[in-house]
Image: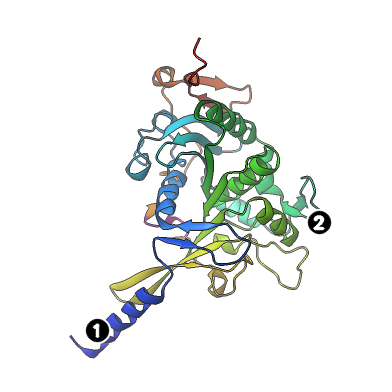
Amino acid sequence: MDKSRWLAVVILMCCCIVAPGMREHRSKHRGHSDVYNHTLATILVEYASAVYMSDLTELFSWTCSRCKDKTEGFEVVELIVDVQNCLQAFVGVAENLNAIVISFRGTQEHSIQNWIEDLFFKQLDLNYPDVTDAMVHHGFYSAYHNTTLRPGVLKAVRRAKKMYGKNIGIMVTGHSMGGAMASFCALDLTVNLGEVNVQLMTFGQPRIGNAAFVSYFKMHVPKSIRVVNDHDMVPHLPPYYGIFPQKTYHHFPREVWLYKVGFGSLVYQVEKICDGSGEDPSCSRSVAGTSISDHLKYLGVELAASSWGSCGIVMNPQDMAMEGLLFSSDSGNLVLSRVLPMPKGREI
């Protein structure tokens, strides 16, 4: 083996020894209860991918091409589709995680350019209890709070907890804009519904609020992880301006930055747990956010719709009648609900 090859091997071995990319990481920062678990990330990223499916029959019955592998056996309780705003989410139960899983779909069609253009300082005050000066992105906040998603999700969570017990945990996930909506959902569940066992893990999420919002968020949703892939451009938006601390958008902690080290075919992916500031300068902020491809694939899983040409959905009503109940609102929005069995001890 030539010297250059030996050098690459030595460097790679050193990276393996010192890199924080192991299977599980616990934060050593006092006052934080967040845990990053690599295995859990590989599971939740599959849920974040599955919600992009447009065939509602396959998604609701969990028979779609992305509804396999580590999420096999998942049972959808409710599938909510806001047709008017091209939004989609599902709520279900993963028995292997002993948790309710909520997943929000990210940007559909070519609309990624549309909301990027609207990212700059379009903020509104957060109307939540016991918070002052907190401002959030208008579009992302409204996508969760002012559409059919929120009532559908909260209803499904209540139904699932009646069946599986009030102590079952809740895991919320999403990619891109779906990560932004997932974050508002996690905060909503803890502040407005009083849920105490909520975990959040998002992928390629943009910034959603200012520093005052971040302080409020990390107090109420301490078990939060934002996974950022290498040079993904979306987590760099809206831009962070240090000279405007009160108005600038700010990430909440804790970021886990995925990046690659090595030479040629000897490449190793590092999972770096960042500091508790949310804006660790040694993590994704240390590189330029210039990549779309890094945004569309996390941990080897595709995170995009199979077709970007339409927000159209596919559904077979006859199959749906066999799987559950279909409700349609006057505006054309859809909620697909599974008929859950009565909880034990309550059978008639």
Evaluate if marks 2 and 1 touch, with contact meaning CB atoms under 8 Å apart.
no
Q: Which residues are magenta?
A: 295-300
Is the stretch drawn in magenta largely helix, strand or loop?
loop
Q: Measured from the top left, where is residue 192 in percent x and y?
A: 70, 39
Q: Percent position (x, y) of residue 124?
A: 77, 50
Instruction: Residue 93 in the image: state x and y as whole percent.
Output: 46, 34
Amino acid residing under circle 1 = Arg
Q: Quadrant of residue 96?
A: top left
**Marked residue nearer the N-terminal end (2 or 1):** 1
Asked if residue 249 lies left or right of residue 226, the reply is right
Give the residue at mark 1: 5
Q: Indicate yes or no whether the magenta region holds residue 8.
A: no
In the picture of the structure, the residue carrying the numbered disc 2 is: 133
Categorize mark 2 by other alpha carbons within 10 Å: few (<14), some (14-19), many (20+).
Answer: some
Reply above or below: 328 against 194. above
Residue ID at (51%, 26%): 163
In 3D space, how far apart are the residues under numbered discs 2 and 1 (Cα atoms)? 55 Å
Local SS, label 1: helix
